[in-house]
């Protein structure tokens, strides 16, 4: 199967790295020439990656086509392209819904998906809506597929998938704090990366227990973890966090 990407930016690059880290068999991968630097880098690194002349050439050469452009670009270019009905389209675009995607592409064979950058190491959830066999078979090689039938419910995962930068800022703040207190940068970064990896792995192993139990089990009464949690709660950290999730939900539900 040939696959194609319209838009060669961060998420396309992560998926292509994921493909080459996986056992997935693809004949050729066609990418659009923008972003030029990323496209050139990918085609140099991976023999099967070809830079198409333009977006239409990506579509013509591929059986499965990913839309990896921003919403503004999508609204500008999609209705000028021809998507034959035998092509499967998967859109990563955050704020163009299925009905509008079908209109813009004049193609009904379309799903939406939310891959995240750790797909490059074959890790992380990939929400697909509506469920689709081709998309599932593809993404099963690259992470944990979660199929959602109801489009409005699928929007909720755009909110929780948007905490990445804030999450890394917690790592960054913790590591910078250690450095300011005199710890060497490489030791600080190693400590923080290992700490968060261990917490995440523990959460994966114990996910069926519910996260409340992890919160409770991580606190000794009157202990240090309890103090940090209480200080953050007092500062309304988690209320602000929930508000940010609500605001993303409003933005993607329009
Ligand atoms: N990054 C994520 O974690 C993530 C996760 C899930 C979904 N998404 C969604 O995926 C989409 C892409 O996100 P991204 O983070 O990969 O963005 P990005 O890095 O900005 O990539 C978008 C790419 O589109 C290219 N482009 C601009 N105009 C184009 C045109 N007319 N034809 C073809 N390509 C064009 C840009 O090239 P130039 O640089 O030359 O302008 C850029 O390489 C967005 O809708 C986003 O919401 C992203």
Image (cartoon, rainbow, N blue to C red):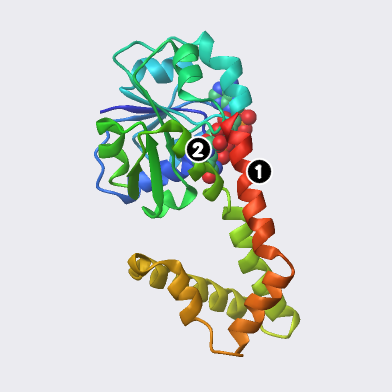
Q: Residue 127, image x and y in percent?
A: 40, 42
Whether residue 66 is visible: yes
Q: Are marks 1 and 2 in contact (CB under 8 Å)?
A: no
Q: Residue 245, image x and y in percent?
A: 60, 49
Q: Is residue 107 above or below residue 45?
A: above
Specify the quadrant that holds the C terminus. top right
Q: Residue 228, image x and y in percent?
A: 65, 79
Q: Is residue 85 above or below residue 131?
A: above
Q: Residue 2, image x and y in percent?
A: 30, 27
Q: Residue at x 59, y 83 (%)?
A: 225
Camera-side residue of 135 and 99: 99
Q: Is residue 85 above or below residue 233?
A: above
Camera-side residue of 181 and 166: 166
Q: Residue at x 58, y 34 (%)?
A: 252
Q: Quadrant of residue 250?
A: top right
Q: Residue at x 57, y 48 (%)?
A: 162
Camera-side residue of 210 and 180: 210
Residue for badge 1: 247
Residue for badge 2: 155
Lateral position of residue 160 relative to residue 22, left or right = right
Lateral position of residue 59 relative to residue 165, left or right = left
């Amino acid at each position: 199967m040939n696959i194609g990407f319209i838009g060669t930016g961060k998420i396309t690059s992560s998926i292509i790295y994921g493909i080459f880290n996986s056992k997935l068999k693809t004949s050729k991968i066609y990418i659009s020439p923008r972003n030029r630097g990323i496209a050139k880098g990918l085609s140099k690194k991976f023999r099967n990656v070809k830079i198409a002349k333009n977006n239409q050439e990506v579509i013509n050469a591929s059986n499965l086509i990913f839309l990896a452009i921003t919403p503004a670009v999508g609204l500008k270019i999609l209705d000028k392209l021809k998507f034959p009905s035998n092509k499967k389209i998967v859109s990563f675009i955050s704020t163009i819904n299925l009905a509008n995607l079908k209109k813009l592409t004049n193609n009904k064979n379309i799903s939406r998906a939310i891959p995240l950058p750790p797909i490059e190491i074959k890790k992380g959830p990939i929400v697909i809506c509506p469920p689709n066999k081709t998309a599932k078979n593809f993404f099963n090689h690259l992470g944990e597929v979660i199929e959602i039938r109801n489009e409005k419910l699928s929007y909720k995962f755009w909110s929780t998938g948007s905490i990445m930068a804030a999450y890394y800022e917690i790592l960054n703040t913790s590591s910078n704090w250690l450095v300011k207190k005199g710890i060497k940068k490489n030791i600080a970064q190693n400590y923080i990366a290992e700490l968060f990896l261990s917490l995440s792995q523990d959460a994966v192993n114990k996910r069926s227990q519910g996260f409340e139990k992890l919160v409770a089990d991580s606190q000794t009464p009157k202990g240090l973890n309890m103090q940090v949690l209480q200080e953050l709660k007092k500062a309304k950290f988690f209320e602000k966090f929930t508000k940010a999730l609500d605001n993303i939900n409003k933005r993607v539900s329009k």
